[in-house]
Image: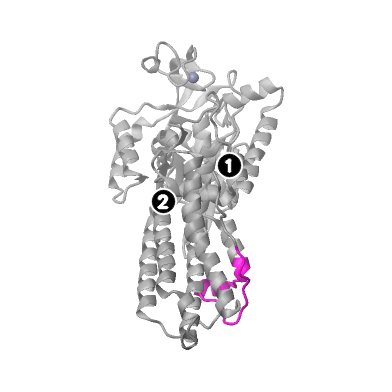
């Protein structure tokens, strides 16, 4: 048993949550549940990023205060996490006073140390993107991100001395023998970025241009800029519950590839400058696209998580997202693929094994659980060996955030147990009265396999697993020991993942 702390990014409240938010958060939930099942003490943090110009502007357009707007959107995220069965430990909002105080503490300390200084920024500014660009980054004199017009801007602002830590950061990343960023291609990308000299990071905006932010404690005419504020959530969320001594440093930050730079460059430098330990792992995932295009509001191709859950069920959605593609890669979301996955693996392989076993238990044992495996044959020895090998693979893959491979191994086990049924053919044993003892052994072994399967699957499809556990009336000790108490009566009808017709 150990402590395990993981985070999702805090999501910016300038839009409704979509499948990308759902993806990161479901993955984090799976990791959290996996560690809880392993009896680790887990802290799982998520939340919303609520300051900045876009929020201020959106609130103005709607005639509400920024606080009212962020309250509203933040609650939309909370509602979605409930709908997706996300068991987070703590939900942090950057407008929480405890977070604001922590940001000020960071700013103050770094200013005292000389890591934050006053300078002048000249560049081009895109209001919708809330971003400055140096001249050379503009494309046809337009914003490189959204192609809109940009404004020329020169102003005083505070800088954080990233440049002073560049060499340290490169060395530090390289010194992580097991890799700090996963997948390794992303680590190489960061090391590539670090070949260019790092410019100091502008971390403030003058108040006349932006009021919706954390005021600098040493200069009330400025507020801090979004990234500096947002990243500190990973630490402040623990401080709010007095858990920083228990859970810091973070075991894993899960992020999308679009926010690699702030997490891989700004954040470690902020922490190092503060004298705090660095997170142990940065896990970067890819994007889901629809027919090869990135989802966006303007293209009108955003997949609504609620609709998918409504249509196919929550666990089918959770399973598909983590099964279909490696976590670090991009994937194309199609309903055909989802239906295919769910029908074959969850329906034919997993669900069918359980309903078949319960059907036979009813037919051959009147639904009563026989005593567990009195005489183990070579066949069960062989199946146990497969199970043990799958356990090792699943644990290794979960440690590497390779969900898809973990599920592939679990499905190997499920399929091998389906073949076991064919091999022992309980229906033949049932015809021979002298084979009754063997039949009982086989049935008890199949029931054990159900428990082993649902334990594997629990982090991924918790609702379904709870249904199975309730149906089998599994006690905690039975669940731990993988063996059902003899004599318990179990009803035969349990249909999981009925076939989805296209
Ligand atoms: Zn722009």
Q: Position of residue 443 (x, y in %)?
A: 50, 76
Q: How many marks?
A: 2
Viewport quadrant of the C terminus: top right
| Secondary element at image label 2 | helix
Residue 244 shows in the view: no
Which residue lies at the image location 62% right of the left edge and 36% below the top edge?
95
Q: CA–CA distance between discs 2 and 1? A: 20 Å
Q: Is residue 82 above or below residue 390?
A: above
The residues colored magenta run 469-494
**Number of residues whose C-alpha sits closer than 10 Å to that of mark 2, classed few (under 14), some (14–19) or many (20 or more):** many
Q: Is residue 80 above or below residue 381?
A: above
Q: Which mark is residue 181?
A: none
Residue underneath mark 2: 404
Which residue lies at the image location 41% right of the left edge and 51% below the top edge?
404
**Number of residues whose C-alpha sits closer than 10 Å to that of mark 1, classed few (under 14), some (14–19) or many (20 or more):** some
Q: Position of residue 147 (x, y in %)?
A: 46, 16
- Give the mark, 2 or 1, whose residue is nearer the N terminus: 1
Which one is in front, 300 or 430? 430
The majority secondary structure of the magenta stretch comes to: loop
């Amino acid at each position: 048993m150990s402590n395990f702390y993981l985070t999702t990014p805090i999501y910016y409240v300038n839009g409704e949550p979509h499948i990308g938010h759902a993806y990161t958060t479901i993955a984090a939930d799976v990791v959290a549940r996996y560690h809880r099942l392993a009896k680790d003490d887990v802290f799982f943090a998520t939340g919303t990023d609520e300051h900045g110009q876009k929020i201020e502007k959106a609130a103005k357009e709607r005639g509400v205060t920024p606080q009212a707007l962020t309250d509203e959107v933040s609650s939309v995220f909370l509602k979605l996490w409930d709908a997706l069965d996300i068991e987070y430990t703590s939900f942090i909002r950057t407008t929480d006073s405890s977070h604001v105080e922590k940001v000020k503490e960071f700013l103050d300390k770094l200013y005292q140390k000389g890591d934050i200084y006053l300078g002048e920024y000249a560049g081009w500014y895109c209001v919708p993107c809330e971003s400055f660009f140096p001249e050379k980054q503009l494309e046809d004199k337009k914003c490189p991100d959204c192609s809109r017009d940009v404004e020329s801007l020169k102003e005083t602002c505070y800088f954080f001395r990233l440049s002073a830590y560049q060499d340290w950061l490169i060395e530090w990343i390289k010194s992580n023998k097991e890799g700090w960023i996963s997948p390794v291609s992303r680590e190489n990308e960061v090391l590539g970025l670090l070949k260019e000299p790092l410019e100091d990071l502008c971390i403030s905006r003058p108040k006349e241009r932006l009021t919706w932010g954390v005021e600098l404690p040493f200069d009330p005419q400025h507020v801090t800029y979004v990234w500096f504020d947002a990243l500190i959530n990973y630490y402040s969320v623990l401080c709010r519950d007095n858990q920083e001594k228990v859970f810091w440093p973070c075991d894993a930050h899960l992020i999308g590839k679009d926010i690699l730079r702030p997490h891989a460059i700004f954040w470690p430098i902020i922490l190092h400058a503060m004298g705090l330990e660095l997170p142990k792992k940065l896990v970067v995932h890819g994007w889901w696209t629809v027919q090869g295009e990135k989802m966006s509001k303007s293209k009108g191709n955003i997949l609504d998580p609620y609709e998918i859950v409504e249509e196919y069920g929550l666990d089918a959605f959770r399973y598909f997202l983590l099964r279909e593609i490696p976590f670090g890669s991009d994937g194309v979301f199609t309903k055909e693929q989802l239906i295919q996955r769910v029908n074959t693996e969850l329906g034919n392989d997993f669900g069918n094994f359980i309903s078949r076993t319960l059907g036979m238990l009813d037919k051959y044992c009147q639904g009563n659980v026989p005593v567990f495996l009195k005489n183990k044959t070579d066949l069960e020895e062989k199946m146990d060996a497969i199970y043990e090998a799958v356990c090792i693979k699943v644990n290794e893959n979960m440690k590497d955030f390779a969900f898809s491979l973990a599920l592939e191994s679990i499905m190997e086990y499920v399929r091998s147990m389906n073949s076991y049924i064919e091999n022992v053919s309980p229906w033949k044993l049932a015809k021979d009265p002298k084979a009754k003892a063997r039949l009982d052994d086989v049935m008890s072994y199949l029931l054990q396999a159900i428990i082993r399967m649902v334990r594997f699957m629990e982090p991924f499809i918790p609702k379904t697993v709870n249904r199975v556990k309730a149906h089998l009336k599994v006690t905690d000790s039975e669940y731990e020991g993988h063996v059902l108490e003899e004599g318990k009566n179990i009803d035969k009808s349990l249909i999981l993942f009925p076939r989805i017709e296209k």
